[in-house]
Amino acid sequence: MTEPVDPTVDLADARRRRRPRGARYGVPAVIAAGGAIGAGARYGAALLWPTATGSFPWTTLGVNASGCLLIGILMVTMTEATPVWVRPFFGTGVLGGYTTFSTYCVDIEHLVAQGRPALALVYLAATPVAALAAVTAGALATRRLLARKRTRGTP
């Protein structure tokens, strides 16, 4: 395995199998709080850059691609030292609430219903390509930045 194992789910470590009292609801609570923030940001983007009926949903594509870029950056940054609540709050909560692949599906359905099947197909293909490219770019750029920082001995 080339990627580090997430220390919050590594069951080989006995300390990680035992949860402190009260931790049962902590992770869902931070995910919900982060989700509210992310969903609010997505809603704000839709208000700032509305998509006209029958046109290409650039806002949803941009939200999903930028969210995936941030997920790539976040996951690489967080693999080394992360407080237990940070990843669920930002990764699952904020960025999970911010990205909106359910709206992506609804956008495709609307484009088809509005007689724009070719545009729907372009959008159908463009979103996962943009999302995968963004998460890959975020992860690679962050790895390079962290490696450069380590070789220079910068804290």
Image (cartoon, rainbow, N blue to C red):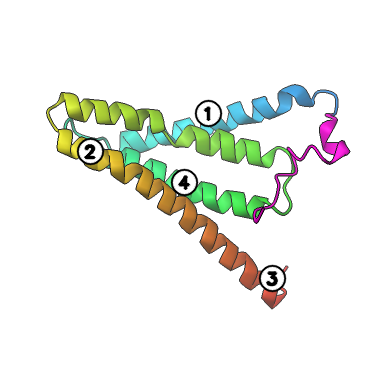
- Give the class, few, some or many, for how many residues have Cα within 10 Å of label 2's Cα (few <14, many ≥20): few
- Residue 19 appears at what percent x and percent y? 83, 29
- Residue sitting at x 54%, y 56%: 139
Q: Which residue is mark 4?
A: 68
Q: Label 1: few (<14), some or many (≥20) within 10 Å?
A: some
Is 4 inside the magenta-drawn segment?
Answer: yes
Q: Is residue 155 left or right of residue 139?
A: right
Marks 4 and 2, how far apart at CA: 21 Å
Q: Main secondary structure of the magenta part?
A: loop
Task: Work out which residue is located at the far right of the displayed protein and give it.
Answer: 14
Look at the numbered disc 3 and give the secondary structure of its residue.
helix
Q: Position of residue 147 (x, y in %)?
A: 64, 69
To which residue does mark 1 refer? 36
Q: Which residues are magenta?
A: 1-19
Q: Quadrant of the C terminus?
A: bottom right
Residue type (three-letter) at the residue carrying disc 2: Leu
Instruction: Tell which circle, 2 or 1, labels the residue nearer the N-terminal end.
Output: 1
In 3D space, how far apart are the residues under numbered discs 1 and 4 (Cα atoms)? 18 Å
Q: Which residue is mark 3?
A: 150
Q: Nearer the viewer, residue 11 or 153?
A: 11
Q: Which residue is mark 2?
A: 121
Up-down relation of residue 74 to residue 23 (above or below): below
Q: How many marks?
A: 4
Amino acid under disc 1: Ala
Q: Earlier in the sequence, mark 4 or mark 3?
A: 4
Mark 4 belongs to which amino acid? Cys
Residue at horizontal 85 percent and vertical 28 percent from the top: 20
Name which quarter of the figure residue 117 lies in. Answer: top left
